Image: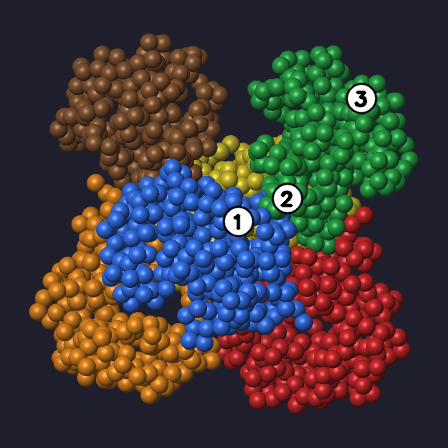
Chain colours: A brown, B orange, C yellow, D blue, E green, F red
Amino acid sequence: MSAENIIYGGERLGIYFLETGAGLRGSKVVYDRNHSGISDVEIGVIDWKKVFQDASVFHWSGLTPAISQNAADVCLEAVKVAKGMGVLITTDLNYRAKLWKYGKAPKDIMPELLKYSNVILGDLDTAFMMIGKDKVNPNYKDADSLPQFYDLFFDQYPDLKYMATTLRYSRSASHQQIGGIFYDKEKLYTATVREITPVVDRVGSGDAFMGGIIYGLVLDTFDPQYTINFAVAACCLKHTISGDYNLATKEEVEALVKGGPSGIVSR
Amino acid sequence: MSAENIIYGGERLGIYFLETGAGLRGSKVVYDRNHSGISDVEIGVIDWKKVFQDASVFHWSGLTPAISQNAADVCLEAVKVAKGMGVLITTDLNYRAKLWKYGKAPKDIMPELLKYSNVILGDLDTAFMMIGKDKVNPNYKDADSLPQFYDLFFDQYPDLKYMATTLRYSRSASHQQIGGIFYDKEKLYTATVREITPVVDRVGSGDAFMGGIIYGLVLDTFDPQYTINFAVAACCLKHTISGDYNLATKEEVEALVKGGPSGIVSR
Amino acid sequence: MSAENIIYGGERLGIYFLETGAGLRGSKVVYDRNHSGISDVEIGVIDWKKVFQDASVFHWSGLTPAISQNAADVCLEAVKVAKGMGVLITTDLNYRAKLWKYGKAPKDIMPELLKYSNVILGDLDTAFMMIGKDKVNPNYKDADSLPQFYDLFFDQYPDLKYMATTLRYSRSASHQQIGGIFYDKEKLYTATVREITPVVDRVGSGDAFMGGIIYGLVLDTFDPQYTINFAVAACCLKHTISGDYNLATKEEVEALVKGGPSGIVSR
Amino acid sequence: MSAENIIYGGERLGIYFLETGAGLRGSKVVYDRNHSGISDVEIGVIDWKKVFQDASVFHWSGLTPAISQNAADVCLEAVKVAKGMGVLITTDLNYRAKLWKYGKAPKDIMPELLKYSNVILGDLDTAFMMIGKDKVNPNYKDADSLPQFYDLFFDQYPDLKYMATTLRYSRSASHQQIGGIFYDKEKLYTATVREITPVVDRVGSGDAFMGGIIYGLVLDTFDPQYTINFAVAACCLKHTISGDYNLATKEEVEALVKGGPSGIVSR
Amino acid sequence: MSAENIIYGGERLGIYFLETGAGLRGSKVVYDRNHSGISDVEIGVIDWKKVFQDASVFHWSGLTPAISQNAADVCLEAVKVAKGMGVLITTDLNYRAKLWKYGKAPKDIMPELLKYSNVILGDLDTAFMMIGKDKVNPNYKDADSLPQFYDLFFDQYPDLKYMATTLRYSRSASHQQIGGIFYDKEKLYTATVREITPVVDRVGSGDAFMGGIIYGLVLDTFDPQYTINFAVAACCLKHTISGDYNLATKEEVEALVKGGPSGIVSR
Amino acid sequence: MSAENIIYGGERLGIYFLETGAGLRGSKVVYDRNHSGISDVEIGVIDWKKVFQDASVFHWSGLTPAISQNAADVCLEAVKVAKGMGVLITTDLNYRAKLWKYGKAPKDIMPELLKYSNVILGDLDTAFMMIGKDKVNPNYKDADSLPQFYDLFFDQYPDLKYMATTLRYSRSASHQQIGGIFYDKEKLYTATVREITPVVDRVGSGDAFMGGIIYGLVLDTFDPQYTINFAVAACCLKHTISGDYNLATKEEVEALVKGGPSGIVSR
């Protein structure tokens, strides 16, 4: 999928305002995405067959169907084409309570979309809410109990192959503990929980995790333990870098995988 | 009290230079306030009756009588008028050893002024020193023992209704633990001690606390426990904000009151 | 040694690029020092007798002989003259694996140079490697065991009077614990280990330590315990200051010596 | 009109993006004002009688009716109330081709609104276009010819008392020549044309001019020549100040009025 | 030619230091390019056939052969391959007296390289010096006399199709006048001379001109007058933009072409 | 005179606030120098014999006696000692109307001080005012007429050897024309007037001029024409440099002396 497939349109550019937290003052986001190009996109505008012609993976985020009915419709249009073309479909549930303002709840929209996903990223509370189930209030620290809940998804979605989630323990806006799990219905793989203090910039750390998962999946030498190790380390490094893009190299991520819970520099 | 009562005068503007600390290097302040307008103000210059005509609270800080005899004299002039007009008088003792350079010690000046205060903010060491008593070296962590010392003030000052103080434990210039107490001679009210790390900017955090106390006092629904909770949370949030002004909204302060010791974001 | 002895020459200025670490992402340095003036200096270019004529101390760093054979040769030329003129010679071993690229290892170069040193600064691993011995993997936390290893140096180098080292425990790039030792072959002097969090800028902290050692040595009232206390405190303060120069005054360093492990501001 | 009359509402905050020009590259503005509070305001929402109760002047800009039919309707609602209460109504035509996107042209909307204006600010081309007349292509440098064109407005709008305009000659984005005229149907008053080079920030210079006109009008000692002199000088000073707010004091504006065409500092 | 052909290698990255001029203080550049990748490149390292396989234009700058004999040799290797593959070869003579330090003068190297160029950009003095002729001291303001001098190049280089140059009149480091000419041996095309004041950043303005020439040459609708108009306007706009990259769009360049000598904003 | 002669004292550090002008908005300065060390200095505090022991030049500015009677008294004490020791005394009249607030006018203080000056820098208006004569309103552009006025000073002050002044024509705060004259009672030497646009920072440009004059005077090869050329060029270059210190090298100043009126870069 190359940049030439980008379509320019819509009334305005979606933006958001970020107030960066510190210590016990959490970050805040104000979204201003209504009437943006992605909000007003329509069925038939994007030639998904052309877009996917050389693609091996299609990743979509739960932010998109949260914006408007149009965006949700086009998302469904996309995943159907992707499935037909044998493209691997990955999804980050990405629940944002401040979006979903167009009259639909996640449970009205997400189940149909998730039917096509091969990989789903999301914590249990979000995942259950999105498919309309009650919260299960799982004790995340007991990661061993996760498979029984995730199995509900595997039962419901036959195309689903893997589920993953970051395990994020917020000590404060400036101090996070980050781990993660990867589950293939057979076995639960977990990665070292690392201390992130200070948090330089949290924005994009979920995307860094997801990028790590996808990277692991498309390797010829796919290895589920390596995949979750790599994804969690990428996510941790992103927290130490300003901006929303993970500037860390593959070598730096791998060095952290081999490092201890306090990072590369500890001896 | 509106801005129209401000009087411009004096030879220069008082300024100070701040070297912001970090970790084990403490912050430093150099005051350059001599010959400023407030330093050279004189009895009779300010029409306090006009200033207080719609006022319900008059707050003064121990910084003012520390600057010059003139400033101390005008402060006394003010509190006498305020009392006569039934205005609530609040005081932050605010001891600064680098001020008080004009030949008087706090014990020479403050007792006469404090006679008129209805609310006094100050830690025990400062409070005792200001009224000329020996330090009592109280163990602040045992806040339960504070009333017996504060009662000395209630005995000496019949107008006094409330005493309050932040409880500040400095782990380093970048890491503080902040609690607070509010005492009405009948009962001691305490607030959760919170971790502040990193300290973004400590300047103005005492004023944020005092503002919280005054806000609580003037509510129709005055509640001493709410008042100290609100004041400590406001003080904590100020530490996470650059500049000397507490930009946090009432809703943000109240959210922190309901949050745990590590802040709003903890789950 | 005054600035008038500086010689300008060489093809270019040596520079380095620093990527400042945070939390579990360590700092990185890229050296670009080849073909710099110091790299291409030659025997006979510097009139060391003139340079040292009013000098009481000559300090050189292991960074210099790591750059080129020329730099190593001139370093040897310098220490021979310094010794002949009775100048105290101090050395920071400063091992940098990214230097030493000209075909020689430290063990080929350093032993000859260290013969002239009166004071050597370096951790045990570095020190052993530089003289061609196997690592001893000492448990630095058991500083009491250091003398037996350092004695090997005193045996080998008759001019050696003192060895010193920082004891640095990296919790993360943002959190360091810093202590230090000073050894005069008779007795091991240790200084309080202090918490450095956050690390504002680590660059120059080793030089701040070395400067503290030299300061202690040249005092008329030389006192080994005072010397190591002062050097460690100077090193700690440098971590809280931006840039590579230790702006802290002597009074500030001494205040920290008297302060507790968490710094000047703790009560 | 005090801040207490501000009503918060609407979906989002209107914003714009500014690319500051230099030399022969002009500035560019991208408006993003759709769906803002002012765009979606409705008839009846603002209690104009209360808003105007102590007001002597109501100023509105042609930017407002350019945004949406709703904004235009509320603007008409406002001027009707203002006229009924005897408030002086001033208008800056402020034509922006990138606005006016809701299906109406200025000539469909502005004539009805301008009936109520007592003071109109605008260059001739804009003014004619807004009332649906062909451009007259006047030679602005021959300011003496302006009255015959402005008289068309006085004929059409019986409430109109004064017209004014800046005379702006752009040598480049960094070099402007600024003059202005003020016309009361009897006489044309002109002000010195001044050189503005470099232009520090042009944003808000039209508002600075308008503010100067209003200031002159509300003085007890209203003098049309003083008014246009003051307005042009205020406009010129704004060009030398960063940001959209004219920080210059009345004294500074008056000093420039007395200064020559090259500013206060020329001798 | 895509990014995948980039080869990483060499000892260091070439850098330069820029001191930006203002008014009568000119800019200064210090080059530090020795031992960089491009300086140490060798014959055979780059697979030029692969590099040029989809290329229609190969542009090289006189900066490259100025760095080292190796760079000059590889440049010659490249142009030979380019010619063999029918790629259009363009050259900016770009003389920099501070380079050319490896023992060769431009006249020893450039004539052989220029044999292959189809388009050469350079002022007459530089061009003559590079082919070893005496300066002709032409009066550039009389651009009509240029063809007779440029014809010497067409006589000497049979592959040469076009010559071009900016005409740059420096009033000061902050004020430049920029025009340009384009010559196809038949006719001399000139563009409007424009005032550039202030100069925001001159770096990259020659490249902006060259880019404009190449853009004009590769259009299906190639038109020599359009080409020089576009190149000069692109060069002028670059002077108003910070950084070395011309952020102006094609539409902005074309708007300036249609604008007058003082830029887009003049009326 | 070395830094070791600096005496620390006084109540505070003198500071000033600068509002940088642009175009027709002039710069503004607010002085806050009362009660500073130099303001409160007293006769006898400085050991001028020691200060001057290796000095060849003593330069004082009219800013100093403008601050306080004490500063004026110490200035007189200094020049008497300097004269006795044969030190060359240079003076910049530096009139600042916002100083001179302690009850004395320049004519009460300066004549006595100027008796000792060997070199005086100042424009005619300032010079006449300082010695209590009426303004002569000379037309500075006719620099040829200056000698007759300057001769009044040579008549009055037998120690005076040279007078000098910048000739500054302000087109605006951003555009200055700078020339200068140097007069030795026999002959008037003038330097090229140069255009300074834009003015980057005017602060310190008078000191740069004075520094140039002193540099010329102390050369073994003293040449009055070279001296004024160098001083004016130094002054011009300072206007293009941020901050109050002239970073230009001697070579850069000399290059400008040889350059034309528009600076080094013109061809």
| Residue F89 location, quadrant | bottom right
Helix, strand or loop for disc 2: loop
Q: Nearer the viewer, mark 1 or mark 3?
A: 1
Label 1 lies in what chain? D
The one nearer the camera, B32 or C140, is B32
Where does label 3 land, which residue?
A: E160
| Residue B43 location, quadrant | bottom left
Q: Residue furthest right?
A: E134
Where does label 1 land, which residue?
A: D125
| Image x and y of residue F144, in percent | 85, 74
Q: Quadrant of the N terminus of chain F?
A: bottom right
Does residue E156 show up?
A: yes
Tell me which residue sits at (71%, 19%) in the image.
E88
| Image x and y of residue A132, in percent | 16, 25
C22 w.r.t. F158: above or below = above
**Could you confirm whether marks 3 and 2 are on the same chain?**
yes
Q: Residue furthest left?
A: B186
Label 2 lies in what chain? E
C24 w.r.t. B208: above or below = above
Helix, strand or loop for disc 1: helix
Does residue E203 show up?
A: no
Where does label 2 land, which residue?
A: E263
Tell me which residue sits at (33%, 51%) in the image.
D75
Disc 1 marks a residue whose amino acid type is Asp
Check disc 2: other Cα within 10 Å, few if <14, some if 14-19, many if 20+.
many
